[in-house]
Amino acid sequence: MQSKRNNNFGKIFENVSRNPLFIGLGVGLYPLVFYYSRNFGMINSWEQFGYFLLLFLLFPIVLFSILKWFSGLSFASKWGKYVLPFFSVFLFLFFIKIILYTDMQRKIILGIFIISALAAFFFKKHFKKWVVIQLLLAAIGLIGLAPVLIKYLNYSHTWKQQPDAIESVVFEKRPNVYYIQPDGYVNFAELEGGFYNVDNTEFKNFLGESKFKNYPNFRSNYISTLTSNSATFMMKHHYYHNRKDYSEMLNARKNIISENAVLSIFKNNGYKTHFITEHPYLMVNRPKIGYDYTNFMYSDIPYITTGFNVGRDVYNDLENTIASKKSDGNFFFVEIFEPSHISSTKAASKGKVNERLQWLEKREIANKKIEKLVNLIIEKDPGALIMIMADHGGFVGLDYTLEVYKKTTDRDIIYSTFGAMLSIRWPDNEVPVTDTNLKTCVNVFRILFSYLSDDEKYLQNLQDDKSYLIIKEGAEPGIYEYIDETGNITFKKI
């Protein structure tokens, strides 16, 4: 009985390993599932899903159907037994490579070729086991993907609801508004002390001469570009959706690029909206574009990318856009990616000393870009409101950014993470008295809209000026309040 059962299993395995459908699924299904489970927020559009089905599943199935036919031809009989094993191993590893490294990486491809050739030559007799292993990996991967899909399908939009009628606000002032976001630029108080300890006189003088008011103790409420901007453009706290991991926030790009309270308010007041960026990081999952203009088209953006291997000069794009803008009623969101933050992982880190030096070098690049953009705007649009606001700090003082998820009570580390630059050039240098409320990113646009509407009632529903972080080590995992409304360090689980 046992031998009969083994024979049945053997026949099943034999049939699976000879069927192009199962060979193709074995090659592509696990890389596809792995990619989705690790990067769902970057690839959750139907357009991408269709592309990946073609690349990871349909292409291998068609290829192995052709290869099976080819290997059965008489002139190919000598090498035919190696063809299916070679391409099965090669494509499987190549797919893994392209989802981990989007660049060509010729040395890695050569290594994959050699491994595939050796595997096909020495282990061709075990090919059916290899196919079964691939399919088992895919099944395990699907189990891991299920919780991600469940979270996505059960995503709640209630957190976006405003506590008042601010989305119906009517502007009394109508300056063009320019929001320049330098990624990871820490606030001036931290820049001149703490782990940064930089002489900031030259840049501050430039801003002063350009009639900017600096807000040296300003900070972010969240620690990444996606989480911070989601709160900023929705003008609401999301508390990381109460998740306990630091995978990418669901629907974050849609919240920023497609539809949010800030865009709605500008559009309701007849403003034309523009998104100009150096890299299409916020567009990689192809969300519906809510802006009237973007300097990237989706035809410019590969399907498999983080967005950073595609770039544009924001100065030239902004200059051209200003030349064709409406006379009034324009909102520009201009994103630059310096100074950014220190390396993300321990493996990539050069150590906290060198990471600091590298951040300072990138800050100099950021300063030059900001100065150039500001000079352009003042020359072409002197009555504009210009806001330079970072999304978070630079994480200087840590060896790598993921260290921040370990509990710490070090005030300088915490402020290195949350401290964010804010400088505003108010039209006619008339600074509103309500600017004393400018403490954290989540409330900036609500305060701005109160100023533009000459109506302080919208300040009655400011969000808490608190900063939050996901903690994974050193305490019970969860979301913690790290900085309270007065700027004091706290550690309260929410």
Image (cartoon, grey):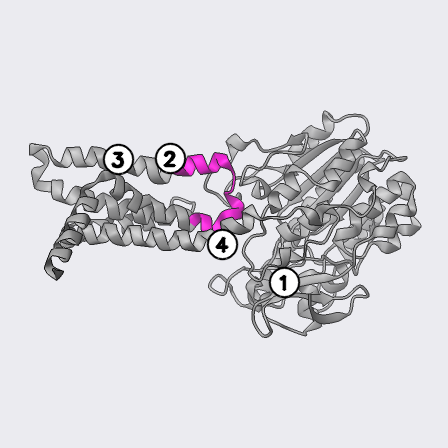
Residue nearest the viewer, comparing 307 with 53: 53
Q: Which residue is mark 1?
A: 395
Left/right placement of residue 187 relative to residue 243 reads right
Q: Nearer the viewer, mark 1 or mark 2?
A: 2
Identified by mark 1, the residue type is Phe
Residue 450 position, x and y percent, is: 87, 44
Mark 4 in CB contact with mark 2 (< 8 angstroms): no
Determine the secondary structure under disc 1: loop
Quick one: label 1 or label 2, which is nearer the N terminus? 2
Quick one: label 4 or label 1, which is nearer the N terminus? 4
The magenta-colored residue range is 35-53
Q: Determine which of the numbered discs, if any, sits on residue 379 in the image.
A: none
Q: Which residue is mark 3?
A: 63
Quick one: label 3 or label 1, which is nearer the N terminus? 3
Quick one: label 3 or label 4, which is nearer the N terminus? 3
Determine the secondary structure under disc 4: helix
Q: Nearer the viewer, mark 4 or mark 1?
A: 4
Separation (CA) of disc 3 from disc 2: 12 Å
Identified by mark 2, the residue type is Leu
Mark 3 in CB contact with mark 2 (< 8 angstroms): no
Q: Count residues near mark 4 (Cα–Cα under 10 Å), then give few for <14, some for 14-19, many for 20+.
A: few
Determine the secondary structure under disc 2: helix
Q: From this view, report whether residue 332 is shown above or below residue 200.
A: above
Magenta-drawn stretch contains 159: no
Separation (CA) of disc 4 from disc 2: 25 Å
Q: Determine which of the numbered discs, if any, sits on residue 54 in the image.
A: 2
Determine the secondary structure under disc 3: helix
Q: Which residue is mark 4?
A: 147
Separation (CA) of disc 3 from disc 4: 32 Å
Q: Looking at the figure, which quarter contains the C terminus? A: bottom right
